[in-house]
Structure formats: structure tokens, C-alpha cells
Amino acid sequence: MAHFVAMEEIYPRPCSIAGALTFLGEKWSFLVVRELALGVHRFDKIARNTGAPRDILTTRLRRLEAAGVLEKRQYQERPPRFEYVLTEAGDELRPILLSLAQWGDKWAGPDRVTIWEHDCGAELEVEHTCAACGGAVTGRNVRVKRYVYPATVPG
């Protein structure tokens, strides 16, 4: 059974964003997920495309694997060689990456903008909508309703 707590009673503020940033909170992790989402699965190409130092990349891959964002799979036995693929959890980061890319195209002043195409053939513009009413989700038109703690969390 879920446990409800009044919002003003909780400090520091509980936050799923903070939880996600525990293993995604720096650029190398997001760039690894980007490469996997773009179909790049081997260490050397991930290193080349991200520019990550090999030791840092190794650490990030292990952290993302431990967090369940990616899976390491052996594709060759002699010598042993591995590739990395997104898990279901990692796959769910795709829309977040697209939103981040769209924000970066607008506000980070890149040298080059990437134009994405949807399956329908139109150029993609990511919009967030409410599943219940279809209305736009801007961040200014939402609020925390309550915090719910699973029954397994003491408190």
C-alpha cells in the first residue's frame, strides 16, 4: 500500500530528477546513450564519436550497465569483444535526448543543427502533451500533486 506525505513536510525535496541524475548527471553518460540510440554499439566508435577519454568511457559504460540503462553483449569469442545496447530503460531516454537536442539547437548555439524526421515524413518538432487531455505541457502549467512512497519505503 502506498504511503502519502504532505509536501511541506519533506526536506530535502524528494525528486526523481535527482535520482536519474545519479547516473546520467554528466555529459559523457548522455553522449553514450546518444550513440547507442543512433546505432553505434562498439567501444572504439563510441569513444571516437563522443570524444570521451577511454578510462572515463569505461567507467560510464559500467555505471550505465549497473543502472540498467544498457546491456553489454559479447559479439566475438576470440578475442572476446563486446558491444553495448540500450535496455528498455535506456530506450525510454530517446525522447528526452530529442528534447535536449531541440533545446540545444535553440539555446546552446551549436555550429550545426540536426534536423530529425518523423516516420510520417515531417521534420520533427518535439512537443510534450498531457496523455489525458492532449494539452501542451510547458512546465508552467503543471504542479506537484503529492509524493507517493511505495509501501516498501519505511516512513
Image: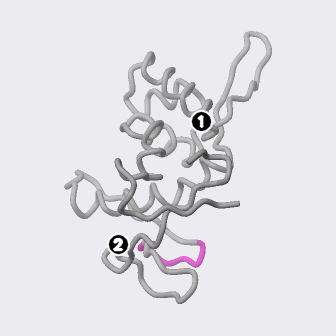
**Numbered disc 1: secondary structure:** loop
| 85 lies left or right of 139 | right
Number of other residues with Cα within 10 Å of mark 2, as a class: few under 14, some 14 to 19, many 20 or more: few
Asked if labels 1 and 2 touch by Cβ distance under 8 angstroms, the answer is no
Q: Which residue is mark 1?
A: 67
The answer to whether residue 51 is above or below residue 86 is above
Q: Is residue 135 above or below residue 34?
A: below
**Residue with the mark numbered 2:** 139
Label 1 crowd bin: few (<14), some (14–19), many (20+), radius 10 Å: some
Direction right: furthest residue: 77
Q: Chief secondary structure of the magenta span?
A: loop
Q: Is residue 121 magenta?
A: yes
Picture coordinates of residue 153 (x, y %)? 61, 46
User: Which residue type carries mark 1?
Assistant: Ala
- Tell me how far mark 2 sits from mark 1, CA to CA: 27 Å
Of 153 and 33, the residue lying toward us = 153
Q: Is residue 66 placed above or below 54 in the rendered structure?
A: below
Q: Which mark is residue 51?
A: none
Residue 134 lies, in percent from the top left, at: 52, 87
For label 2, the SS is loop
Question: As shown in the figure, which amino acid type bears the numbered disc 2?
Answer: Gly
Magenta stretch: includes residue 152? no
Residue range corresponding to the magenta coloring:
119-125
Say which residue appears at 45% left-offset and 40% top-offset. Answer: 24
Q: Residue at x 80, y 15 (%)?
A: 77
